[in-house]
Image: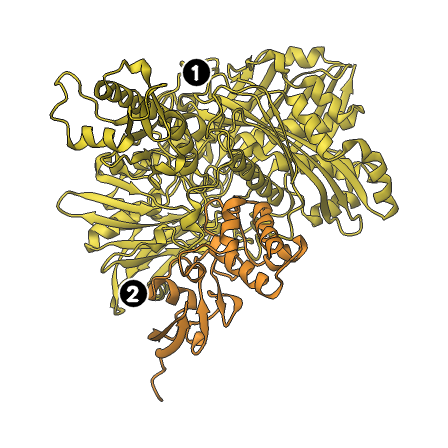
Chain colours: A yellow, B orange
Amino acid sequence: MMTTVTEQGRTLEKGFVGQSIPRKEDKRLVQGQGTFFDDVRRHGMGYVHFVRSPYAHAKIVSIDVSKALELEGVYGTITGDEVAIHTDPFFEMSVEPGGNIKDYALAVGRVRHMGEPVAAVCAATRELARDAAELIEVEYDELAVLVDAQEALKDEVVLHDDAGSNVVWSGVFDWGDVDAALAEADHVVKIDKLHFHRFSSTPLECAGALVEYDKGTGEWTLTCNHQMPGVGAIWMAPALRTGIDKLRFVTHDIGGGFGNKICLHPQYVVLCLMARKLGRPVQWTEWRTDQHTANAHGNERWFLDVEVGVMKDGTMTGFKVKALDDCGAFPRYEPLGCIIWAQVTPGMYGWRNIRVDFTQVCTNKSPVSPNRGYSRMQHLWLTERIIDIVAGELGLDPVEIRKKNYVKTEQMPYETPNGCVYDSGDYSAALDIALELIDAGSIEERRKDAAARGKLLGLGIGSTLDSGTNNFGQSTLLNPELQFSGNNEAASVKLDIFGEVVVTLGTVPQGQGHETTAAQVVADILGCSPDQVNVRRGHDTWFNSHAGFSGTYASQFAFTGLGAVKGAAELVRDEMIQLAAAVLQAPPEAIELSEGFARIKDGPPEAALPFMALGAIINANNAFLPPEFNPTLNHRYVCRPYFGMVDTEKKTGQLTLTYATQIHAAVVEIDPDTGEVDVVDYAAVDDCGVRINPQIVEGQVHGATAHALGAALHEDFVYDEDGTLLTANFYDYHVPHAMDMPPLKTGAMESPSPVAPLGAKGMGEGGGGGIHCICSAIQDALRPAGGAIVYDSCNPAHRVWSMLRNPESTRANVSVTSK
Amino acid sequence: MAEPVTSRTVSLEVNGEQLEYDVPTRRLLVHFLRDDLGLTGTHIGCDTGNCGACTVHVNGEAVKSCMLLAVQADGTKVSTVEGLAADGELTALQQAFNEHHALQCGYCTPGMLMSATALLARNPHPTEEDVRYALQGNICRCTGYVNIVDAVVATGGKG
């Protein structure tokens, strides 16, 4: 594995931060000693199974649970009617019409997508629960089905009568003067239609929870794998007509999330009702087929009527587009997707004039939720498609047009047309590293060699941003009434009696190595080894170390999560120094913390207190301390970044804080007889500022690349005209296996963020670079074979084969008007 | 007509311990291991036999325990991820997974380790291609397989 690193300076002295120390989490996980929610048992617990709709759209005529209840070992059932009595609909984020949608935990009166839960049954064993579910009789009356977003716009069939329209939200974002830019441009390139498809990262562990209800206190404890409990609780508590203090979320190890475990509140509310109704702990583990069918897809987006202004020298002046987002049957988190793309409005380019006319609609498909690269990935794919299509149509070099239009490193920090600030980076330098890694200089030679073997070879580039630490104030662009803004994350650090350093996080890691990286930061600040730092696993509301937006999402642990850890550790460090100064009778500035001791700098070896002594004094042996000196060695710190306010009129503001760069480059070979695409060379270059743990960063790059390659080449949630999902399991929905992955080369740069507490930017999402890059490479490979335009983000063999057979049909979508 | 048999007694060795158990005949081996024996290191990631998170050894061979009924394991020797470092000392492969950052969420890891352990037993010095071939029945959604393959190849190289 090749890693090229260019360092541009650091904001921290080199200690444990910056080292690839092996992860602390691994020891338990490699021995099968991790604890995932499904591993947790309670005495007398019941297993829940959901009865789901086989139809995409139907009225529920009747539900009869009597036969299920007669089965021995069945504890009880819940139907939509009970849900409608005992809960309120979840709050909707959007203004009207989407804001009028009524979304309950179970279908009430009507089902709107295949797999929608209509009833739940709880029984003594998993097998019995399934048996009982089959005995529940549901009578449906089928309704006309909508699977196409453009059809949905016609409102001939309407999913939600309360909304009266399939449109959830629409709005125009208009920055600069795009009409003037297009009028002044030497060329205007028009692209009629591009489609970003539906897929999801499909974490290997499905969703679920064990829910216990305490009748005496009215509190629920959810041992679960929700990756954003702060927001989950905001959804659930009002629906359950209770306070947020009555919901305790506990997570241990989580088997991947990727955003797909953010919208679990409907199922969790059913579990809460079931636990209360039955007076026993209840457990639900989602089946894989159910996850694919009815949990959370990534959002699907059409880009229509794109117009791009280009000057003779290749300078791009602006673009306009109509974006049509298909959020499936219920919008839930997804209205935010109407806004979040705006964090990366111009992509990596210097466009100053941009108009996006954005509309989101409901269809009879699975609801969507954030999925790695959430909403920005779709938009970045558009910008990269624009660049390659423009380059192809105008005969410009794809590398040169990128370099000409990239935001330059000397422009950093760079304010985009909509007020976001790109904090640091050198996009051209990163592209050069990527091109060198795949030996782009030899590409024409390799093209000839491939042609001699009957293959079409192409080179592609995907330049992408991973924007991190979002400002929830952007939700006011969606709905000015929403009372959200800013962001926050909490952590606590304490020194215990025997000198144990204990860290609790508000974040909810799912494999990102937070225990390790938090320990690295704390060890550097307190002067000890990461081995001495016990970072508690997972999230627990009762740790009291969380904040309103706690969770692991939106590429922000490096900023807010570690910012909170750093803040809490510094408070403890300062008190340890004061305490040691008092005990050793030295001025605080003479005290240093190192190797697990508080020492007098350059003092005699005996002038040193082990952490154990400091912890013991404060916690157990403190009578001699004067009353005015009251250190606790136990601190909670909230990292609350400053964003300023969002301007809802102009739709401008600081929507996020850090921008990690990823440039991907690939060489593909296509078999013209079959359309099979073989990725023969691949490089990903990441610049996330200071890398706390380079090995973990590289692991995230690998993972995001694998997701992107799967999405670009085969992962696709395909529906038939009846709204039946055709790819509902790992047979039909093919995720990359070890044999599918090409050799990956990685490169790294470090452009420290001037705004982040440690100079480190969030980078876990990756921005979908591989999707952009593979589309780019396929289009390049197809140039000598009819010059098809890659118009879809997913290009399995059959689609490539069609493009080879009928390139004209794709080319008809593109036209150029020149002065 | 005779009542259908809904449970049977199975006798098998699990991680070196001889056990006798009454199990429902329809119970999957993976549920028997997890729910009855509490060996929760073996995971479930799909319902179609594709993902390999449930891989264990039956008589030394890597098998997907969601594809067997518990009664089919009668008379066999089963070992699970919990049996790898039975004396508390990580195996060379487990150490290599840690050193090479071959796991992120850790959910596929037990299955990966069991498949790779079986590979190393029959082919102590596998090439990268051997490793990829042997692990193609195990899905990982976090790592892109890069570091997993490195860890297994490195373990073989050390052998």
Question: Upstream in the sequence, badge 1 or badge 2?
Answer: 2
Q: Residues within 10 Å of mark 2 (few under 14, many from 20)?
A: many
Which of A753 and A716 lies nearest the eye of the viewer?
Answer: A753
Amino acid type, label 2: Ala
Residue A158, x across and y down, in percent: 45, 40
Q: Secondary structure at mark 2?
A: helix
x, y (%) of residue A463? Answer: 64, 28
For the residue pair A298 and A503, the one nearer the viewer reads as A503
Badge 1 and badge 2 in a common chain: yes
- In this rendered view, identify the residue nearer to me: A588 or A316: A588
In the picture, residue A280 is in which quadrant? bottom left
Q: Chain of mark 2?
A: A
Q: Residue at x 41, y 76 (%)?
A: B71
**Disc 1 crowd, CA 10 A, few/some/many (<14, 14-19, 20+):** some
Q: Is residue A407 left or right of residue A456?
A: left
Instruction: Give the residue number, with chain letter if any, for mark 2.
Output: A68
Q: Amino acid at mark 1?
A: Thr
Q: Residue at x 41, y 39 (%)?
A: A509
Residue at image position (72%, 30%) is A435
Q: In the structure shown, which secondary structural element does the residue marked by tag 1 occupy?
A: loop
Quadrant, the C terminus of chain A: top right
Quarter where residue A515 is shown: top left
Q: Which residue is mark 1?
A: A648
Image side of residue B42 versus residue A634, left or right = right
Furthest-bottom residue in this view: B1
> Which quarter of the rendered picture does the N terminus of chain A lie within?
top right
| Residue A269: percent from left, percent from top | 30, 45
